[in-house]
Image (cartoon, coloured by chain):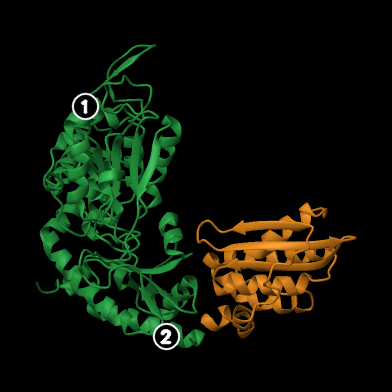
Amino acid sequence: MGLESLYQEIILDHYKRPKNKALQDKYSVEVHHNNPSCGDEITLRVQVENQIIKQLTWDGVGCSISQASSSVMSELTQGASIEKALELEVSFLELMQGKGQVEADEQELADAVAFSGVARYPARVKCALLSWMALKDALLRAGGSK
Amino acid sequence: MPLLDTNLIRQDFPILGRTVRNGKKLVYLDNAATSQKPLVVLDAERNFYLNHNAAAHRGAHLLAEEATDAFEGARAIVADFISAQSSEIIFTKSATESINVVSYGFSNHLSKGDPFYISKDNNIVVTQLEHHANLLPWQQLAKRSGATLSWLGITADAQIDISNIDSMINDKTKIVAITHQSNVSGAITQLEPIVKRAREVGAMVLLDACQSVPHMPVDVNKLNVDFLTYSGHKAVGPTGVGVLWGRSELLEKMEPMITGGSMIDHATIESATWAKAPKKFEAGVPNMAQAVGLGTALKYLTKIGMDKIQSHEEILVAKALTGLQDISGVEIIGSKSLLNRGSAISFTLEGVHPHDVGQVLDDYGIAVRTGHHCAWPLMQELKLNATTRASFYLYNTPEEVDIFLNGVREVKKFFKV
């Protein structure tokens, strides 16, 4: 298990060509999160209508893992219900905290499965989680419940 | 001067012989964060606990005497190492604590004639190059006292800009808190003009020597500063012990930040008077084993020779600087020559985030630091979020510099930049 398991092609693709990385003008909630230990930052804007994520965009700086994770998260949650997006967040969190022992559900997590290798590098888990923590915060503020 | 005999030195540091990821040999280049420890230091701590452990300065028994001798013996070594007096050496838990001790020595509740009296009419001067440890205590003192916090900027070479010290350090300045050597750019501060200006206006000078004392000969008499601090663990000593040196006439007047056992001259239920320094600043049973370990560490460094260690590092740094500049996309932060620079080299690699640089290097067994290095104001000035930092010490070898440079080339290959 080497670098290739950490930096899967999908991750490097999303890093080089991030999706939804341009903040929209119209939004219900904006949140800003950072990792004080490393300096990575994300700003997230979410437009919610009838408990559905109509549009989600982000901007940020950070390593390939944090940037690719933001990109994948933005794709997965676009158009999802708040409830569904929060479920995804729980699954992704479980995967990241599983120390490499948790089997990822490809059906549910799609491209986010590529981050399975990150769980074996404890110092990088926070990079992958940054955008998802921002998402959770934004959705709870937008009216979701835990 | 030639390189040190690293084959011999490395035998003293068993950890350097271990393998890391994928069975790769460890190449430890994170010395600015913490150094590795030689066996003699571990043995000294163990020996203290095995044979002499008791509370120093307390008790009428033999062990208490021996513990006191060991602790005070360590103080004498620490003093000697920077040509100071034992009574001017205070053991703290870290350099961070040392700086806090001094910052809390200042107060606007003192009488106006007190050298540590500070008020809204004063200013405190720091620099943009400081580690948070030598910034936040002053920032907070400014908040508490109403004093103004001002700072010296940096030059294009990431050195402290001294062009405007005459206006920045003025008759309102109470203290100038400044790094001796940057933990990010490796810049060595040109102290003389700063100290001279501080003397002219009667301001104190505190020197953060965390990155200098472990790497070069330092003599407090030549520096002519008022306070100097460093941490033991960056100087092949144990964690949990820091040093604060201060001029005796100032220590005599400075109020203690921490009060409690063993630091009093006299105490009643309602009041107390303080013991003389250094005891005044060492409340509680001290970190004896760590102090003994640090004493042994400094003896170890002295035996090798601080001037030789400095020369050894210069050879490694010169090699690394040259090698890095040969790699396209690498940008070195600060001086690209040995002039006024120490062993920490920070750099960026175009198209690859420092954390990813560090991750690939780690895969080759190379331990570097990535991130903001607890120097956000400097990062903000440089318009960077993070850098990769390699920092060298007495046990590093030219071969390791080659492995590191090759590692950086591998990073480029891996990320196709």
Q: Is residue B358 left or right of residue B154?
A: right
Residue B130 visible in the shown view: yes
At x 21% / y 55%, what residue is drawn?
A: B190
Chain B shade: green
Q: What amino acid is found at the position of numbered circle 1 in the picture?
A: Glu
Q: Is residue B257 above or below residue A62?
A: above
Q: Position of residue B148 (x, y in %)?
A: 40, 37
In the image, residue B54 sits, relative to residue B220, either above or below, namely above
Q: Residue at x 26, y 66 (%)?
A: B343
**Residue at the extreme right of the image, as rendered:** A50
Give the residue at mark 2.
Answer: B410
The reply, left or right, for residue A31 in relation to residue B138 is right
Q: Residue at x 22, y 36 (%)?
A: B201
Say if residue B71 shows up in the picture.
no
Q: Amino acid at mark 2?
A: Glu
Where residue B405 appears, x then y in whole percent?
33, 81
Q: Which one is nearer the viewer's eye here, B98 or B342?
A: B342
- For the residue pair B403 and B210, the one nearer the viewer reads as B210
User: What residue did someone put label 1 on?
Assistant: B252
Contact (Cβ within 8 Å) of mark 1 with mark 2: no
Mark 1 nearby-residue class (10 Å; few <14, some 14–19, many ≥20): some
**Chain displayed in orange:** A
Above or below, B237 against B174 in this view is: below
Residue B298 is tagged as none
* Residue in view at x 17 percent, y 32 percent: B248
For disc 2, the neighbor class at 10 Å (few under 14, some 14 to 19, many from 20) is some
Locate residue B110: give its quadrant.
top left
How far, Cα to Cα, is label 1 from label 2?
56 Å
Q: Nearer the viewer, residue A140 or A92?
A: A140
